[in-house]
Image (tube, grey):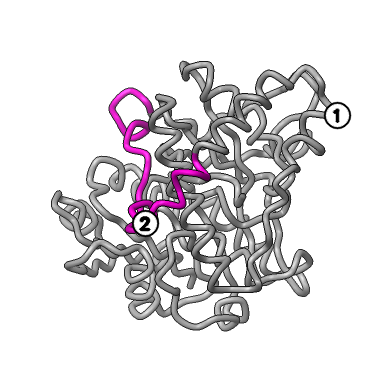
Amino acid sequence: MTSVVIAAHNEAAVLGRTLRTLLADAAPGEFEVVVVANGCTDDTAAVARSFPGVTVRELAAPSKPAALNAGDAAATGFPRIYLDADITLTAAGVRALVAALTEPGVLAAAPGRRLDTTGRPLLVRAYYAINGRHPAYRNALFGRGAIALSAAGRARFGPFPDVIADDLFLDAQFGSAEKREIGSVCTVVATPRRTADLLRRLVRVRAGNAMLRAADGQVRRARRGSWLVDVVLPRPWLLPAGVCYAGLTLLAAAAARRPAARRGWGRDESSRRDGTRRDDVGRNDRVSSRDGTAPPVGTEGAAVVRATSADGDREVAS
């Protein structure tokens, strides 16, 4: 039995769709779903309980690491999927991630990703023109909102540490040959709708990544000039976007040094508002770019399982 652990803090508006999509085509007893409502002031727990068979745990304090640990304590099956509460992942998508874990030596798997910048302001679109091509995301576990681990993979570490960058922590536990990015399962990440929301999020990400790197020497180090060397120089037409990317990154880096930026786990609320989410599950479309590349949405002729995210919190580990 595959166990799916969902840490949910005030996710009543999106959790129902996540659970409906996950369970719609699941066979009886195929998945064990554990939702941990942590520090909620809305109906997150009630929404989870409305789905038969879903195990619900409640924590008084808002803490994603504590929620993940509580979910692990309640879950009994493997492989184990850690799924963000705002991600819609189909049963077929889960099966594809689980299937990857049967490959020799593979301990962790994650979907590909596509960035939705529709209707966003110029600075947000410019930032993600660089972010979407950043090589740090290649065969990485972070930035998707869904990570699958085998039993051996989960045994690689103990409890989740009290850090903001939980997906970067997981990524650091495995070598490149032990991870798989599954192109047939594509997470659509809805980016922040305002530049101020993006900047606030980048500050949190920067602070969280710095805290994790200070505590864990295994975490991959950031290549500060990669956006220029690997993204802009091969594509000179992206230079204006690169200037915007660098400016926003520098502003976030400066703000992240403040003590207030290192407290708590934040998220972008703007991409959770009504009218900002698109239910793309089941659609098989292709996204092209000026340089002829496309985000990982599977191979020619393959069925693409779409997983939709309304969370712009998932940024590059820089």
The circle drawn on residue 86 is none
In the image, what residue occupies the spot 68% across and 71% down?
174
In the image, what residue occupies the spot 73% across and 21% down?
238
Location of residue 268 with respect to 64 vertically, above or below: above
Residues 45 and 253: in front is 253
Q: In which quarter of the image is residue 203?
A: top left
* Boundaries of the magenta span: 252-276
Label 2 sits on a secondary structure element that is helix
What residue is disc 1 on? Answer: 234
Report x, y in % for residue 123.
53, 21
Location of residue 163 with respect to 293 vertically, above or below: below
Label 1 sits on a secondary structure element that is loop
In the image, what residue occupies the spot 57% across and 69% down?
149
Location of residue 237 with respect to 102 vertically, above or below: above
**Residue 50 part of the magenta-drawn span:** no
Residues 8 and 4: in front is 8
Distance of mark 1 from mark 2, alpha carbons?
A: 37 Å
Question: In the picture provided, is 235 more to the left or to the right than 106?
Answer: right
In the image, what residue occupies the spot 17% across and 67% down?
60
Mark 1 or mark 2, which is nearer to you? 2
Query: How many other residues sit within 10 Å of disc 1, few (<14), some (14-19) or many (≥20)?
Result: few
What residue is disc 2 on? Answer: 259
Q: In which quarter of the image is residue 170?
A: bottom right
Location of residue 74 with respect to 55 vertically, above or below: below
Q: Earlier in the sequence, mark 1 or mark 2?
A: 1
**Residue 275 part of the magenta-drawn span:** yes
Q: Quadrant of residue 107?
A: bottom right
Three-letter code for the amino acid on which mark 2 is drawn: Pro
Residue furthest right as drawn: 234
Three-letter code for the amino acid on which mark 1 is drawn: Pro
Report x, y in % for residue 79.
54, 71
Report x, y in % for residue 57.
23, 69
